[in-house]
């Protein structure tokens, strides 16, 4: 097992650990106890500039892009192997930093991060071009080239997975990277910097700058040495990031907010449907953009579904994320907890009926909120239309396929959606009409690095995962050779 030294939480620039230029540091809080566990360096514009310069030098001298795709793939395979060898440390860091249940950190976060690097390792030597038939007396062909320096900006809810979903394809294509993790959850990013170096990624190819969005993030967005921005976060911040990129004519990938509808028809297997519904809104304490916080139920089974949820949801194990039986941990921070409380109070004012939950759980000073089911809200309720980003489920009835689709498509978001039905024709019919980047049928959150993921409308643009992601980290060059 490799031992990576990340204390005392320094920046990783040009293959070296260093303090912020002005010595600034920021606290990292354990959300299960509300207690400070460590501090990390807080990068400023000077540090971001150093990181971008290191990435630019590493790109320009070809120490990474000059390797064959096959050699880059071998190193990325080694990254995946090191992730698996250091699974216990990574899971512990992710659980401590985010408040994720340790069992899910192992099964989901660490496993998917390793799969990301493994998948793009396999694609690293598949970047190819094509010859084009033209009337010219010439040989015309295309080739794909890396873009250069990629700014990878990731959120607090899935630090390890969402970093890998950007860094792995960027590296596979031959780019260099400056990664700015969320200021609340930087620990796994620093740990991964060491693993990438140990796997053989040359100095300067991956750099990590921890710090705030308004300072470090803004400096990275606006840096003239950045060639692409890969961003995951809120729609509001994504709009700003896309605007800055537009000013500088830089390509972007934006994976933004979500407010997915989960549609249950009367012919669904209700036992399986309930399991998918609960997973869709309590996983990661509801802090995931592809969650399913809006449940739409065919009226004949509406009351039955509410009754099942009222009994089942309070039984989902909620508590200390370090306990292996825990399924729902704390919110990632106090501000996230307060936001959920405000939305539930708003639901009460708007006439919503709290079927279960609706309050904090007082435990060890942590930021816990009981999974909450709310019925009887109108569709124009803010709690229905906006992204709550917590363990809150609203439930609405519908009377026809047409109404179900209209309700599902009625919010500004379009990241994910789901359909529960035993009618195969209906599943395809509804999937075609849902305005979402991915549609799950008879389950929720089925993801694999081979399947592209991303949104429409206010949920962003571009795709992560799959060959589509790899292509987005390259540019096409055309070469025309005269045969005269």
Image (tube, rainbow, N blue to C red):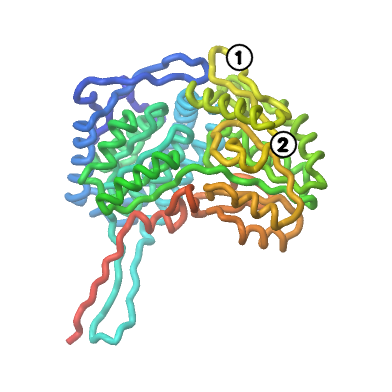
Vertical placement of residue 431 versus 135, above or below: above
Residue at screen point 32% across, 30% down: 210
Q: Which mark is residue 65?
A: none
Where's the N terminus, which quadrant?
Answer: top left
State the image quarter where residue 238 is shown. top left
- Disc 2, SS: loop
Label 1 sits on residue: 362
Front residue of 244/347: it is: 347
Q: Is residue 106 left or right of residue 276?
A: left
Quadrant into which the C terminus falls: bottom left
Q: Is residue 433 above or below residue 223?
A: below
**Residue 114 image point, x, y percent:** 46, 42
Mark identifier at residue 376: 2
Which residue sits at x=40%, y=38%?
154
- Give x and y (percent) for residue 193: 33, 34
Residue at image x 27%, y 77%? 140
Disc 1 element = loop
């Amino acid at each position: 097992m490799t031992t990576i030294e990340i204390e005392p939480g320094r920046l990783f620039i040009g293959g070296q650990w260093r303090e912020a230029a002005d010595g600034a540091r920021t606290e990292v809080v354990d959300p299960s106890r509300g207690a400070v566990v460590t501090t990390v360096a807080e990068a400023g514009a000077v540090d971001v500039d150093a990181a971008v310069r290191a990435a630019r030098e590493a790109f320009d001298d070809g120490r990474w892009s000059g390797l064959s795709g096959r050699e880059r793939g071998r190193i990325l395979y080694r990254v995946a192997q090191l992730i698996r060898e250091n699974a216990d440390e990574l899971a512990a860091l992710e659980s401590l930093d985010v408040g994720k249940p340790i069992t899910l950190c192992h099964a989901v976060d660490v496993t998917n991060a390793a799969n990301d690097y493994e998948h793009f390792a396999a694609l690293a030597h598949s970047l190819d071009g094509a010859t084009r038939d033209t009337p010219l007396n010439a040989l015309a062909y295309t080739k794909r080239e890396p873009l250069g320096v990629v700014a990878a900006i990731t959120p607090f809810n899935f630090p390890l997975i969402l970093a890998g979903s950007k860094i792995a394809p960027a590296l596979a294509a031959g780019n260099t990277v400056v990664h700015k993790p969320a200021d609340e959850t930087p620990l796994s990013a620093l740990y991964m910097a060491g693993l990438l170096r140990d796997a053989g990624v040359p100095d300067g190819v991956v750099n990590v700058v921890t710090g705030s969005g308004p300072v470090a993030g803004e400096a990275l967005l606006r840096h003239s040495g950045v060639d692409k921005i890969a961003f995951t976060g809120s729609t509001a911040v994504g709009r700003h990031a896309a605007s800055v990129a537009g000013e500088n004519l830089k390509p972007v990938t934006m994976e933004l907010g979500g407010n997915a509808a989960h549609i249950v028809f009367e012919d669904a297997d209700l036992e399986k449907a309930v399991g998918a519904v609960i997973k869709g809104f309590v996983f990661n304490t509801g802090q995931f953009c592809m969650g399913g916080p809006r449940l739409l139920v065919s009226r004949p089974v509406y009351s039955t579904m509410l009754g099942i949820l009222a009994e089942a949801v309070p039984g989902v194990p909620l508590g200390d994320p370090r306990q292996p039986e825990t399924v729902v941990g704390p919110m990632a921070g106090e501000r996230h907890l307060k936001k959920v409380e405000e939305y539930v109070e708003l639901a009460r004012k708007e006439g919503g009926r709290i079927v279960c939950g609706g309050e904090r759980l007082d435990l060890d000073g942590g930021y816990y909120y009981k999974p909450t089911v709310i019925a009887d809200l109108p569709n124009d309720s803010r709690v229905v239309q906006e992204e709550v980003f917590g363990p809150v489920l609203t439930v609405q009835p519908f009377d026809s396929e047409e109404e179900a689709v209209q309700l599902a498509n009625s919010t500004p978001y379009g990241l994910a959606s789901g359909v529960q039905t035993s009618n195969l024709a209906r599943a395809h019919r509804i999937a075609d009409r849902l305005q979402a980047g991915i549609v799950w049928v008879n389950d929720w959150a089925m993801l694999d690095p081979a399947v592209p993921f991303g949104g429409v409308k206010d949920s962003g643009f571009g795709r992560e995962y799959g060959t589509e992601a790899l292509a987005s980290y390259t540019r096409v060059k055309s070469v025309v050779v005269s045969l005269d």
